[in-house]
Image: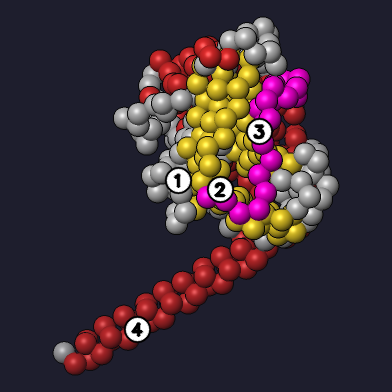
Amino acid sequence: MRQKVRKLQIAIGAACVLLAISYGWLVLRHFRAERLRARSDFEPLNQAAQLEAENAETHWLLGRYWLRLAQAPEQALPELNAAVSLDPYAARYWLELAVAYQVSDNAPRERWAVERALQAEPSSPGTAWEVASSYLATGESHRALPLFRIAMANDANMVPAGLALCWRATKDVHQVLREAVPADPKAYLQFLQMLAREKEPEAANQVWSAIKAQQLELIAKDAFGYVDFLIERRDVDRAQQVWSDLRELDPKLKGVPPDSSMITNGSFEGDTFNGGFEWRQEDKNGLAVSIDRRIFHEGARSLRIVFTGPAVDNTGVFQFVPVKGDTAYRLSAFIKADGLVSASGLRIVVEDAYSGETWAAGDEVLGTSDWQEKHLEFRTRPDGRLLVVRVVRRPGTPLIKGTFWMDDVSLLPDTTVAALQP
């Protein structure tokens, strides 16, 4: 009995040793094949294939070598077919096979390989992109656009390039909106901004109409580029309507009462967006612009500009305001100064946004003063549609130091100045 047990133990031990040797040999073979696959030359790849003939990636790499380096698609096809046969669930193998068939002018097999790639990984952004590009190359935009949508919906980094491809291929804004743009407000806005950059006003307007119709929630500042595009095109009425729409679409602006005057955020109590029909600030050397929460006329905040010495002609603070032609207006603002020293002080001016013509200029502000209300009365020209309120110096060459505050800026039609001319 003991002898039988002993023999069984020896047999089991021998089997374990054989298994360990076999496993070790497999590991070493795989390790060597991996090292060979890491090289792009034919010989090491061929050796890897001999070591692991059943490895799909090895055949794929050999196929890529023949196709892309040796430019021999007839030799690439057997390797790539072997790869997809061994692993039919790797889309990149099918896509490489599709390229080989394309180079070989075999359109039916190319289409077959492309469709198999999509079946292998239907939700992969990369696969959807490659297949969509293949359809686009053959003019099948109706097949390509939904796949671009899958790619863009799953990878936000693909959105700008994807939308550009879809637009250039179709030039049909309705088709792109219907079939390609993901159901994401950011994607709609990126499409809108792209069309604005490419000077496509009608298409951009249609995208905005779609955003508004669907009541897509967005952040107002993300649409400022479109507002600026409309301002640049002198489409002031539409720009004003978009500005009004933003109050409905931006959750942070819903319920915020509209300004009592034509100046947006004239009290500086709200957030300053630096765009649209809001206060803007261009960076200028020699001064610092900020919101002051300690010194104000009313409310809890004011605008502060600190001058450090160098000459400054334009503070960079301004706001666009839509107006009516041949209409009288009255601008008022509360101003405070502390130690403003210069041969040329600050002024609030009103200019035509397009011609640059000055419609009104306030008194010069210098020295130190408590809050004072300043008034500017003017009439727009018959073709006047958009003005700019600025804080400037004229002349702007003298050096200047000190602090300037502005608060409670208001602009309203004024029948008492009807006889005044610009």
The magenta stretch spans which residues? 349-370
Location of the C terminus (image quadrant): top right
From mark 1 to mark 3, how far is it between C-alphas? 19 Å
Q: In terms of sequence position, does the residue under pointer 1 or pointer 2 come before the other?
A: 1
Mark 1 vs 2: CB contact within 8 A: yes
Q: Give the structural element (helix, strand or loop) at label 1.
A: loop
Q: Residue at x 21, y 87 (%)?
A: 5
Q: Which residue is mark 2?
A: 336
Residue that carries the numbered disc 3 in the rendered image: 362
| Pointer 3 or 4: first along the chain | 4
Q: Is residue 369 in the magenta section?
A: yes
Q: Quadrant of residue 374?
A: top right
- Alpha carbon separation for disc pair 2 and 3: 14 Å
Residue 349 visible in the displayed image = yes
Pointer 1: residues within 10 angstroms few (<14), some, or many (20+)? Answer: some
Mark in the foreground, 3 or 4: 3
Residue 415 lies, with reference to residue 127, above or below; the image says above
In the displayed structure image, the side of residue 396 where residue 367 appears, left or right: left
Q: CA distance from mark 3 to mark 4?
A: 103 Å
The answer to which of 314 and 104 lies nearer the viewer is 314
